[in-house]
Image (cartoon, grey):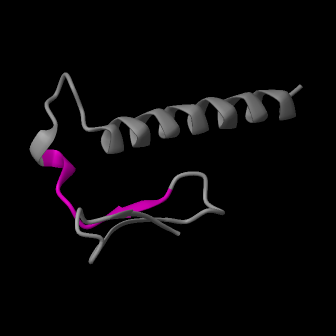
Amino acid sequence: MISGKSVDQSLVEVIELADHPWYVACQFHPEFTSTPRDGHPLFSGFVNAALEHKTARNRAHAHSQE
C-alpha cells in the first residue's frame, strides 16, 4: 500500500504491507531528524512494535508451558 508521497505527489516515498504486523519501506531519510532521545516516529514505531511482538510471543510461550 502506498502510504506516503512527495510534497508534489510525483514520487512514492513510503510503502507498507497491509497484511504484515509491521513493514514499512521509505525513500526519505528519517535518521536526519532523529536523536537518541527523540527518535523519528518511524524508528520509535518500529521499536515499539518489536517490544509488543516480543511481549505477545513471551505470553503465548508461557501459556503453552502451563
- Residue, far front: 8
- In the image, 59 versus 47, the foreground residue is 47
Q: Is residue 23 above or below residue 41?
A: below
Q: Quadrant of residue 63?
A: top right
Q: How many marks?
A: 0
Q: Horizontally, is 23 left or right of 21 in the view? A: left
Picture layout, residue 5 above or below residue 59: below
Please tell me whether residue 27 belongs to the stretch shown in magenta.
yes
* Residue shown at 60% from the left, 52% from the top: 21
Q: Residue furthest left?
A: 32
**Whole-percent x and y of residue 52?**
57, 32
Q: Is residue 8 above or below residue 64?
A: below
Locate the C terminus by quadrant.
Answer: top right
Range of the magenta residues? 23-31
Q: Residue furthest top?
A: 37
Task: Say whether residue 60 is left or right of residue 38.
Answer: right
Outermost residue on the right side: it is 66
Is residue 1 left or right of 66 when viewed as pictured? left
Q: Magenta span has 39?
A: no
